[in-house]
Image (spheres, coloured by chain):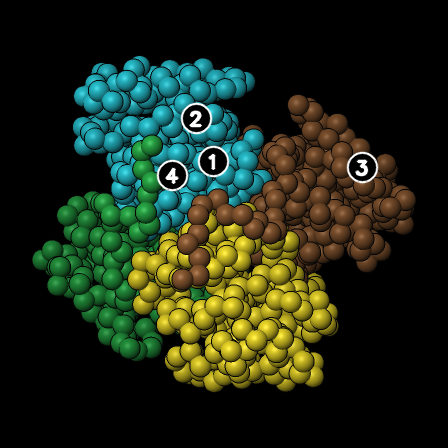
Chain colours: A cyan, B green, C brown, D yellow
Amino acid sequence: MTINVTIWNEFRHEKSNPAVTELYPNGIHQAIGEGITGDVSVRYAVLDDAEHGLTEEVLNSTDVLLWWGHMAHGDVQDHIVERVYNRVLQGMGLIVLHSGHFSKIFKKLMGTSCDLKWREAGEKERLWVVNPGHPIAQGIGEYIELAQEEMYGEHFDIPQPDELVFTSWFEGGEVFRSGCCYTRGSGKIFYFRPGHETYPTYYNTEVRKVISNAIQWAKPVGREYPSYGHVPVALEPIKGNK
Amino acid sequence: MTINVTIWNEFRHEKSNPAVTELYPNGIHQAIGEGITGDVSVRYAVLDDAEHGLTEEVLNSTDVLLWWGHMAHGDVQDHIVERVYNRVLQGMGLIVLHSGHFSKIFKKLMGTSCDLKWREAGEKERLWVVNPGHPIAQGIGEYIELAQEEMYGEHFDIPQPDELVFTSWFEGGEVFRSGCCYTRGSGKIFYFRPGHETYPTYYNTEVRKVISNAIQWAKPVGREYPSYGHVPVALEPIKGNK
Amino acid sequence: MTINVTIWNEFRHEKSNPAVTELYPNGIHQAIGEGITGDVSVRYAVLDDAEHGLTEEVLNSTDVLLWWGHMAHGDVQDHIVERVYNRVLQGMGLIVLHSGHFSKIFKKLMGTSCDLKWREAGEKERLWVVNPGHPIAQGIGEYIELAQEEMYGEHFDIPQPDELVFTSWFEGGEVFRSGCCYTRGSGKIFYFRPGHETYPTYYNTEVRKVISNAIQWAKPVGREYPSYGHVPVALEPIKGNK
Amino acid sequence: MTINVTIWNEFRHEKSNPAVTELYPNGIHQAIGEGITGDVSVRYAVLDDAEHGLTEEVLNSTDVLLWWGHMAHGDVQDHIVERVYNRVLQGMGLIVLHSGHFSKIFKKLMGTSCDLKWREAGEKERLWVVNPGHPIAQGIGEYIELAQEEMYGEHFDIPQPDELVFTSWFEGGEVFRSGCCYTRGSGKIFYFRPGHETYPTYYNTEVRKVISNAIQWAKPVGREYPSYGHVPVALEPIKGNK
């Protein structure tokens, strides 16, 4: 069954930084989209679209949403964040990439600051698989090596992941929980660390494989949203004590 | 070492519902406070105090905060919620009681709707210990039985607890994860289900024991808040751009 | 892609207890097998087969193994248990049903006693979904109701599940964590509580749906078993002893 | 309240390898014991003692057992392993150190192979705190740095820890989950990675602090072992369907 994927990108660095323009001429979102394999239908949405491209209609027909943002987290309108949030709780998958750790939507879903250490020094990153039986690690060897990336270091202020899939080693001496799975409401969330805008990370075959795997993992199970609220009639007789 | 506990109560039902006034003449907070054992120093704060009784000074000298609210969640000011939230991330323990599941602070820390099913029918609740080695279950037998309580039923829309200590059986046919542990930032959070305002739950010896245990468990470890942000100098040499 | 399923059954009650013979004339394994939907190929193996039907050849071509046992756990040979265990660590899925909680293979994989309370009183069981977004709960409503089942009660001595999908309510007053997910090595394990031999549980449509879902969830990701052991050559230069 | 600690050491390397003898003249166990702070009473037990020093009497009066073994895991008798295992399930804390990952007791409690990669190259290890609010990390800065240690690398074949406290960075390019918390039965288990016999790791102040913290965390809660088995009489009336 075809999975409907929407890739959301801030799409600002690509317009303001020539190095990024050269690397991702059609935007980071397109590079990500071109790398996705499997039975998926891909759409794009960017910050400067009307409603950031995330209308009710778009979200209601999205199975899995990918999110890349960095320099303009504050420009994302709160009511759109609320809309995405509600869709996740109802079952839409969400894949948050790299600097998206500081997006409003990720912080709202995590309930923590999502803060971390960082350094831009073009250093080597090695993402070790710590859960080899996890579907997101399917087809990945013992680790993914990226010659140059931005460093993100612990402590990463997130809730303990429901499942931890990758842990990164950095040349400069830090480690980072770099592939983290969560369930919130009926929705599945995967945070995947690499993807700084000045490196060709989203052209990397294994990074693309992980993203494709994560889409399969995060797709909704297609059940109705559970009911809540007042249930005055009990399923079983109640004696009471009055 | 003495643990500084602040018990926060909405303190509205006690003023408007004669049945509650009779049951908790000095407020639910006082009944809770009187039941706490161990080396603790207890203060009280209520919604109608200035700044809801949760000034910077009070919070900075609080090790563990207890929270009971129900009918007036919306009256709690957002900047006070933010203040409590930041203190939790920095290490203050938080114990959320009963209808506090819908408080702003709990929903913000969980990142989910915290919705559930409910019914007021004076039915029997039996809280089964599912983690007998957990310090919060210390001194509790196989279960706690409450002759009459409000029912809360699954699905309870919370993140999967880091540790689940109690699961409730209800006479009317439902179950509920009724003792849930979380860590958020450096702070520990315990959600404990029972405590509807029209029942004498906070006079129950075992309920009081659980609350006393939870305070010990949730106390801060007393370390500095971890550092975050830019760390331009690496711990190890980086070969850098070739 | 077709999933190769092997259903293992002790197949003793069906031969010795006329009530069970009548209910499951071809054995519990066949009733389970007939209820599985999806692209699967089903084989059967029973205790009294040579090597309990679990030869190297059978196990090496099994993606997901189901296990029902009760009165003859002790008759399962240790070297066969070891064989199954190694296959699970290498990625084979394992679904342990009902009284299989006390099987050698489940206890070995859990590392605990797997003990519990039990009662045969033909009482009502209601399995509540506590993780509505989980693929194993796909297509299931808020709960599954079974008119008559054996009771299993907490404390159930298992490691905290990686994911908890169902929690049971019993008419007689107990609760039970009745749908539990684990990963061990590269293999996924699902424990599913209902299925006492004297009740028609394995003809129940929703129980069959859960088992079919669990097979999809537990299928191996098809990666090589990770390497271990001595790696004398480092990936990065080491300065070594000063 | 005084915690009764027993430190178990294989005590073979110290007798056969002069470098180890020089480093730990009274055995690794004594170096560990001398570093423990807090209200504890410390005893020692070694492989070559009668019953490996782990008589029923010793175990029944032990609150927390520490375990260091490496070259002689196979010499530990199975019935003593069983005895330790039962005590852990009943609530005794267990702290497994370094090469104890391959001990019979740890593998039995984990239910996995506990395999890993390793290299003896005298390389730098940096143990990062990934859970700063955890009591085991109390008083530890952002990381512990050890100038020279043996490398242990992922994939480490363990169940996902209930709580992960440390993750190690190694100079040679690997990472490792180096501080892992579990509950099994009523007992708490902490695995702590560093401590190769040829390095002065157990004289390190921060390593000693972690071990002291872990003892406090792992102490039993002092409750009776939960009951299991047949409970023919229900807590609530059962209608039955006969």
Label 3, label 1: how far apart the Cα atoms are: 34 Å
| Residue depth check, mark 3 versus mark 4: number of the one nearer the observer | 4
Q: Nearer the viewer, residue B209 or D183?
A: D183
In the picture, the disc for residue D96 is none
Chain letter for mark 4: A
- Binning the other alpha carbons within 10 Å of mark 2 as few (below 14), some (14 to 19) or many (20 upward) gives some
Residue to which mark 4 is pinned: A124
Residue to which mark 3 is pinned: C58
Residue to which mark 1 is pinned: A144
Of the numbered discs 2 and 1, the one sitting upstream in the chain is: 1
| Residue depth check, mark 3 versus mark 1: number of the one nearer the observer | 1
Identify which amino acid the numbered label 2 is placed on.
Asn
Give yes or no for contact between labels 4 and 1 (Cβ–Cβ under 8 Å).
no
Identify which amino acid the numbered label 1 is placed on.
Ile
Identify which amino acid the numbered label 3 is placed on.
Val
- Binning the other alpha carbons within 10 Å of mark 1 as few (below 14), some (14 to 19) or many (20 upward) gives some
Residue to which mark 2 is pinned: A204
Q: Look at the picture and state if C39 lies above or below C212.
A: above
Q: Nearer the viewer, residue B97 or B188?
A: B188
Give yes or no for contact between labels 3 and 1 (Cβ–Cβ under 8 Å).
no
| Mark 3 residue element | helix
Residue, x 76% and y 48% (percent of image)? C83
Report whether mark 2 lies on the same chain as mark 1.
yes
Classify residue A197 as left or right of residue A204: left
- Quadrant for residue D35, please give it: bottom left
Label 4, label 1: how far apart the Cα atoms are: 11 Å
Q: Look at the picture and state if A186 lies above or below D86.
A: above
Report whether mark 2 lies on the same chain as mark 3.
no
Q: Is residue A95 visible?
A: yes
